Image (cartoon, grey):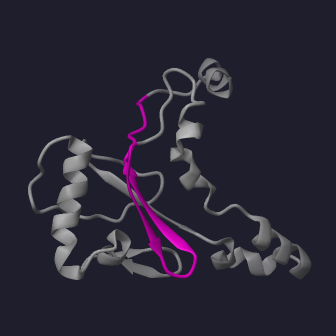
Amino acid sequence: MNDVTTGIRAWTVDRLLDVAPTAVDTAVSELVGQALGREARPAATLEVVGYPSGGRPWSLFCKVLQHVRHWPMLAFMPPDEAVHFAADFPWRSEVELWDAEVLATLPPGLRAPALHRVVELSDDRVAVWQEDVVEAPRTWDVELFARAAH
């Protein structure tokens, strides 16, 4: 079984895909096929990568979002502030990127990565399977930063 390890806890791929362990190959093939826009080979290699990730032409990126109470640095905040921070922190807001209303506000030439699957995990965690966006081989100069800020 392939394990995907976060800094705190290991998640098995079947749990990240919300399928039976025997269905992992099929589920991964479906995701790869969706990403490629055509039928994919039934076998795939899963690799744990650090963020930001590198990429291959058909790679997918799975990010596990989790409630801020799982953040180890929370213990270093003053207790009253930590309680308010944990209560108010919008840990799921990244998933809202794919809401139709948000997508409609993106300027021309900007799009969200393709979303392939969102899997609700236990203990206030969610696995987001999305397009693995490869960074353009371009140097960020003042003009590019200004364009991005605009």
At which x and y percent is residue 48? 35, 65
Quarter of the figure with the C terminus = top right
At which x and y percent is residue 70? 63, 78
User: In terms of depth relative to the viewer, which is nearer, 89 or 58?
Assistant: 89
Q: Is residue 70 rendered to the left or right of residue 108?
A: right
Residue 19 sits in quarter: bottom left
Quarter of the figure with the N terminus = bottom left
Please tell me whether residue 116 is drawn above or below residue 91 in the rendered image. above
Please provide the residue range marked out in magenta.
114-137
Q: Residue at x 62, y 27 (%)?
A: 148
At which x and y percent is residue 120? 46, 71
Q: Residue at x 64, y 26 (%)?
A: 145
**Does residue 92 show up magenta in the picture?**
no
Q: Residue at x 25, y 64 (%)?
A: 46
User: In terms of depth relative to the viewer, which is nearer, 73 or 81?
Assistant: 81
Q: Is residue 21 rendered to the left or right of residue 77?
A: left
